[in-house]
Amino acid sequence: MSKTHEFRFFRLVARNLAHRPYRNIATVFIIAIIAGTLFASQYLMSGAEQSLDAGISRMGADILVVPERYAAAGQSVILTGTPTSFFFEDSVFEKVTRVQGVAKASPQIYIATLFASCCAAPVQMIAIDPESDFTISAWLKRNPGVVPGVDDIIIGNSVIQNVGRDLIFYGHTFHVVGILEKTGMGVDNAVFTRFEDASVMANESGTKAVRKVTIPEGMISAVLVKVLPGASPAEVALEIQRQVPGTKTILPDGLLNAVSGQLSAVTRLLSGSTIAVTVVSIPLLGIISAMVADERRREVSLLRALGATRLFVVRLILAESFSLAIIGSFIGIGTAAAILVAFQDYIAYTLKIPFILPSPLALLAAGGGALLLSIGIVGLSSLYPVVLITSSEPYMALRGGEL
Amino acid sequence: MPSCSYIRGTGVLLVLLGILVILAPWFIFPVCEMHGLYLQAASGMQFPMTCGWTARAETGVGALIAVAGGLLIARGTRETRQAVGIFSIASGVIVILLPTVLIGMCKLADHPCRQLTLPGLEILGVVVIVVGGLLLWKRGDE
């Protein structure tokens, strides 16, 4: 009995909605815009934050020490993998290892590769010291079969080549032995090689490459630092800058601030649009609901005369409104998700932010938030018609005094 | 049976989608050669990149989708709707397969063809498939 009643109730809801298609399509459209913009701003923030987490954990370091003049370039290498080359003296490495609070340090050399054509990628080559490195070592621990030898490279996820194939940089042939997991950050655009192989490549480039690359003797580009357990990375970073003049330290928090800054204009625009649309839509939806309520007083009175309780009528109105909210939210969230997923590379490239697809939990939270807001807006705008309908007497309405 | 305006409307939509598939890789989401990026041989001769060939193939598929839409506008019988529905689904699949599997796009992630043309064509392909599916679902009886 109860099942039959529920079926009839929802059929009534569906028929009522189908009876006023244009008005309901307009309502669904407004809700879709609100839900879509809110979802988009949440999606972008979670994607950037998760990409940053993945990239920083891949870097494996608490602090990156770069030449003071090249702090911005160093940040770009980590965030977007913009190929660059810069150097400072390798004595910096020794000095950094002696700073209190430093547990481990490892030098790196950055070499921007040449841009030749479609498939000879301009990527960031990062030469590492296998003895002290902890960037690739974590990955190598998970892939015990890979033992990088002479001219072997491990490539980032966005560098197009397969394991076992070769890549040529500055005329020197390297052999791909591993591909790192996607992080959405600069490391995806990087290739990792050993100091010795990079040096051989540089020496040969004069005869083999279109342009000679020079790695100055006794120079490195950056020092990765892991702090002692319990030590504050921020304090150790300050100490490094104080004790080793001419250096600049980059911390994960600083990167997060940089990304938030780059994203702020977009998220502000999206949040602003959501607020503007919400503020305009609540009274607009209220007016639409009130008009519908006024039109439906006779219909509601008939229902009441047939035995429907006030509660039934309130449920009917709310069910119709919430159905529109849910349909609109799903359309808005679905459209926004399709566009954001399809164009995510373009968005990340244009905004110069690290970006990966957010986790299902983050997507669920963003979608759920947008859905709840839409239901809340519709709930608020339904209050007036609910009061109007439930306060009228069916006898008076049917008698024609009011209609 | 679906109404005449529904069938004509779907035909017009298919014609528009066909035109969009033609225009997307050249003007809406232009491929690399529209940005002046070409492959250069040692002799100095310039060739279109992989995405350029995809764009040319998409132009042909787009034209066929537009013709199918025109057919639906001219003669919307049940058989036509069914045939155009199946044809649209197949065309939509090809619109997606050309830049992803059959020909491909440039390999570099920061090339305009990968950032804009590829997702644009994928979305258009999905829409063409959905319209074809709707035509089949709502083909009705004569």
Image: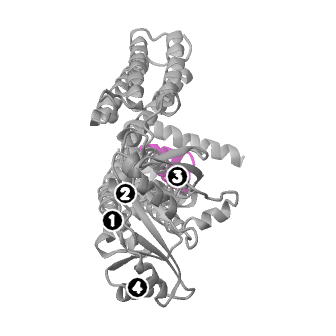
Give the residue type at disc 4.
Ile
Give the residue type at disc 2.
Thr
Q: Which disc number belongs to residue A82?
A: 2
Q: Main secondary structure of the magenta part?
A: helix
Give the residue type at disc 1.
Ala
- Give the CA separation, mark 2 to mark 1: 8 Å
Is the residue marked by circle 4 packed among few (<14), some (14-19), or many (20+) residues within 10 Å? many
Q: Earlier in the sequence, mark 2 or mark 1?
A: 1
**Same chain check for tags 1 and 3:** yes
Residue A320: in magenta span: yes
Q: Chain of mark 3?
A: A
Q: Chain of mark 2?
A: A
Q: Earlier in the sequence, mark 4 or mark 2?
A: 2
Q: Nearer the viewer, mark 4 or mark 3?
A: 4
Give the residue type at disc 3.
Asn
Q: Which residue is mark 3?
A: A157
Q: Which residues are magenta?
A: A296-323
Q: Which residue is mark 1?
A: A73
Q: Which residue is mark 4?
A: A240
User: Contact (CB < 8 A) between labels 2 and 1?
Assistant: yes
- Give the CA separation, mark 4 to mark 3: 32 Å
SS category of the residue bearing label 4: helix
Q: Earlier in the sequence, mark 4 or mark 3?
A: 3
> Residue A399: x, y in percent?
41, 45
Report the coloring of the rendering: one colour
